[in-house]
Image (cartoon, rainbow, N blue to C red):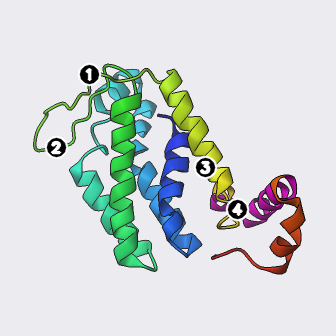
Amino acid sequence: MNLIVHTELSWLVAQVLPKRRDRIVVTIAGLAPDLDALTLLGGSRIYGTYHHVISHGYVAALLTVLVAAAAARDRAKVAMLALATFHLHLLCDLAGSGPGWPLLYFWPTSRHEWFWSGQWNLASWQNGIVALVASLACLGMAFPFRRTVVELFSLKGDAALVKALWTRFRPSRVKELDAAPPAAG
């Protein structure tokens, strides 16, 4: 899966949290496994050796949960959701990163490689469907929660997108949107 889809899926999981800060923390936790993609800076050989290894395992999961909980307002919920989004990322990588990309979940204590025999290519139709559904679900959050994934980057941009979606799909109720603030900030 690509970084955009990982972001969207992690943000969708975080929607149970009322505080924007906690939703951002959980979303970042879902992106944390791809920190090992920075090995690309050392060249393609190093990237090929260490991507899906260094930060795609239990040690990184524990560190991610600890950092997420420390940064959160609702520490217990954020810790649980950070663990969930971290592992959702791994599941998506296992399914959709393409054949030849195993996970070494127990690294550094074990070099056992985890494969799924049905792995999809990165540019597969399956990944395209997941991406489309995730994007539509992120836009759909504008209706019950009055926010979209754009909140991660810009509250002003998010408000404009929510208003545009309401104007297009709920024109008779746009006054409700103007009268009340978002469901939770």
Q: Amino acid at mark 2?
A: Phe
**Relative horizontal placement of residue 180, taking residue 48 as reference (left or right):** right
Instruction: Please give the residue where the numbered disc 1 appears in the rendered image.
Output: 117
At 25% from the left and 46% from the top, the residue drawn is 57
Which contiguous range is marked in magenta?
Answer: 151-168
**How far is the residue under mark 2 from the one under mark 3?**
33 Å
Question: Is 60 part of what is drawn in magenta?
Answer: no
Q: Amino acid at mark 1?
A: Ser
Image spot of residue 177 (x, y percent): 81, 71
At 52% from the left and 22% from the top, the residue drawn is 125
Mark 2: few/some/many CA within 10 Å (<14, 14-19, 20+): some
Badge number at residue 137: 3
- Element carrying mark 2: loop
Mark 4: few/some/many CA within 10 Å (<14, 14-19, 20+): some
- Element carrying mark 1: loop
Figure check: 68 above or below 138: below
Figure check: 54 above or below 129: below
Mark 1: few/some/many CA within 10 Å (<14, 14-19, 20+): few
**Relative horizontal placement of residue 6, taking residue 178 as reference (left or right):** left
**Relative horizontal placement of residue 130, taking residue 136 as reference (left or right):** left
- Element carrying mark 3: helix
Q: Which label's residue is closer to the chain start, 1 or 3?
A: 1
Instruction: Please give the residue where the numbered disc 4 appears in the rendered image.
Output: 143
